[in-house]
């Protein structure tokens, strides 16, 4: 991506210098748009890096903190963090929840989904 940005910048500079005149307003506008685009690409890249770091931290927490039956939702939350999704059913028997955690990047090798099942706030079963 850096190569493309450098080539575009070089080509615009070459055109400007090759004409031997001051850049036209149209060229200046294009150059400003290019700078804004480069800045946006950098912002997106930084956001992607931040998200990948969050995923790596979540994966580390899940991998390094085994859970056991009988612990509370609060204990799981402190060990693994907030789940990606919670499915809840409520009935006369109480509250049942399925917490869904993921490890890795979806559609990538090593991607895993873990399911935790709670009855009235207590971990009763899980799938790995």
Image (cartoon, rainbow, N blue to C red):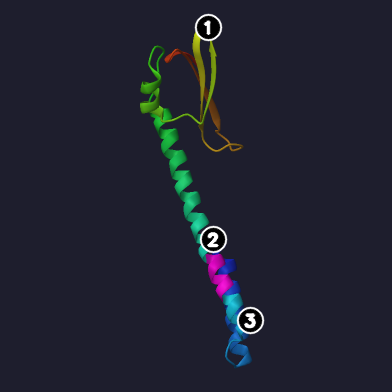
Q: Quadrant of the N terminus?
A: bottom right
* Local SS, label 2: helix
Q: Find numbered disc 3 in the image and state the secondary structure of the residue it sits on.
A: helix
Find disc 2 in the rendering and name its residue.
Answer: 41
Which mark is in front, 1 or 2? 1
In primary-sequence order, the first of circles 1 and 2 is 2
Q: Residues within 10 Å of mark 2 (few under 14, many from 20)?
A: few
Tag 3: Cα neighbours inside 10 Å, few (<14), some, or many (≥20)?
A: few
Judge from the rendering whether residue 30 lies leftward or rightward of residue 65; answer left or right: right
- Could you tell me which residue is drawn at 61 percent across and 37 percent down? 107
Residue 40, placed above or below residue 118? below
Tell me, for residue 8, which label it has, or none. Answer: none
Q: Residue furthest bottom?
A: 20
| In the depicted structure, whether residue 67 falls above or below residue 56 | above
SS majority, magenta = helix
Snapshot quadrant of residue 9: bottom right
Q: Earlier in the sequence, mark 1 or mark 3?
A: 3
Q: Which x, y percent locates residue 63?
A: 42, 28
CA gap between label 1 and label 3 equals: 70 Å
Cβ atoms at labels 1 and 3 below 8 Å apart: no
In the rendered structure, find residue 92 and report the number of the disc placed on it: 1
SS at badge 1: loop
Q: How busy is the neighbourhood of tag 1: few (under 14 within 10 Å), some, or many (20 plus)?
A: few
Front position among marks 1 and 3: 1
Q: Position of residue 77 (x, y in %)?
A: 39, 26
Read off the residue under disc 3. 26
* CA–CA distance in space, label 1 to label 2: 53 Å
Please say whether residue 26 is visible from this viewpoint.
yes
Magenta residues, start to end: 32-38
């Amino acid at each position: 991506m850096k190569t493309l940005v450098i080539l575009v910048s070089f080509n615009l500079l070459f055109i400007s210098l090759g004409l031997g005149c001051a850049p036209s307003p149209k060229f200046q506008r294009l150059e400003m748009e290019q700078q804004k685009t480069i800045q946006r690409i950098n912002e997106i890249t930084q956001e992607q890096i931040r998200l990948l770091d969050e995923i790596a931290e979540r994966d580390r927490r899940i991998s390094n903190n085994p859970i056991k039956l009988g612990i509370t939702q609060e204990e799981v939350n402190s060990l693994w963090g907030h789940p990606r999704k919670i499915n809840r059913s409520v009935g006369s028997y109480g509250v049942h929840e399925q917490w869904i955690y993921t490890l890795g990047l979806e559609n990538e090798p090593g991607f895993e989904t873990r399911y935790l099942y709670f009855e009235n706030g207590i971990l009763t079963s899980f799938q790995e």
